[in-house]
Amino acid sequence: MPDIHVSAAVIVDDAGRVLVVRKQGTTRFMQPGGKPEPGETPSQTLIRELHEELGLTLDEADLEPLGTFVSEAANEPGHRVVAEAFSVSIARAEVVVQAELAELRWITPADAETLPLAPLSTEHLLPLAWPGSGR
């Protein structure tokens, strides 16, 4: 199964909600982030992607590495996603849908039960944001 390498952000607000986004032409929500450009490190990829997708201006000191996670790709059948994940703290008012994004939502564990989510989110990233929630 071919790998798709990405960087992803786990962003939690003061109320404990997690930011998820949906790209245009897709149905599943996932953590913001994306694929690297040639020569980019995972953190450089995430900083660029968060700026393009959400209008955030961050630097490497704003990112806390969470690890590398592997799941079935949400939007590319027959592929798996290999994600370098980072925790990012921001003010909720800072984010704006831009670039290829169609929608963003701040979700709770209850929302996650009914929202179509990417396997990477449900298997790895949301449990990091909500330890002990059963999600």
Image (spheres, helix red, strand yellow):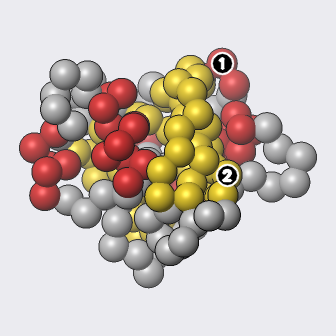
Mark 1 lies on a secondary structure that is helix
- Within 10 Å of disc 1 (Cα), the crowding (few <14, some 14-19, many 20+) is few
Residue farthest along the bottom direction in this orientation: 25
Amino acid identity at mark 2:
His
Q: Residue at x 32, y 37 (%)?
A: 126
- Within 10 Å of disc 2 (Cα), the crowding (few <14, some 14-19, many 20+) is some
**Side of 92 relative to 66 (left or right):** left
- Residue 8 visible (yes or no): no
Indicate the position of residue 42 as horizontal and vertical percent values. Answer: 71, 38
Indicate the position of residue 10 as horizontal and vertical percent values. Answer: 44, 35
Q: Quadrant of residue 14?
A: top left
Q: Which mark is residue 20?
A: none
Mark 2 in CB contact with mark 1 (< 8 angstroms): no
**Side of 45 relative to 39 (left or right):** left
Q: Residue at x 53, y 45 (%)?
A: 70
Residue farthest along the right direction in this orientation: 39
Mark 2 lies on a secondary structure that is strand
Q: Nearer the viewer, residue 54 or 108?
A: 108
**Side of 86 relative to 127 (left or right):** right
Q: Which residue is mark 2?
A: 5
Indicate the position of residue 104 as horizontal and vertical percent values. Answer: 35, 57
Q: CA distance from mark 2 to mark 1?
A: 22 Å
- Residue 86 visible (yes or no): yes
Q: Quadrant of residue 34?
A: bottom right
Q: Nearer the viewer, residue 114 or 22?
A: 114
Q: Which residue is mark 1?
A: 61
Amino acid identity at mark 1:
Ala
Q: Mark 2 or mark 1: name the one nearer the start of the chain.
A: 2
Q: Is residue 114 above or below residue 85?
A: below
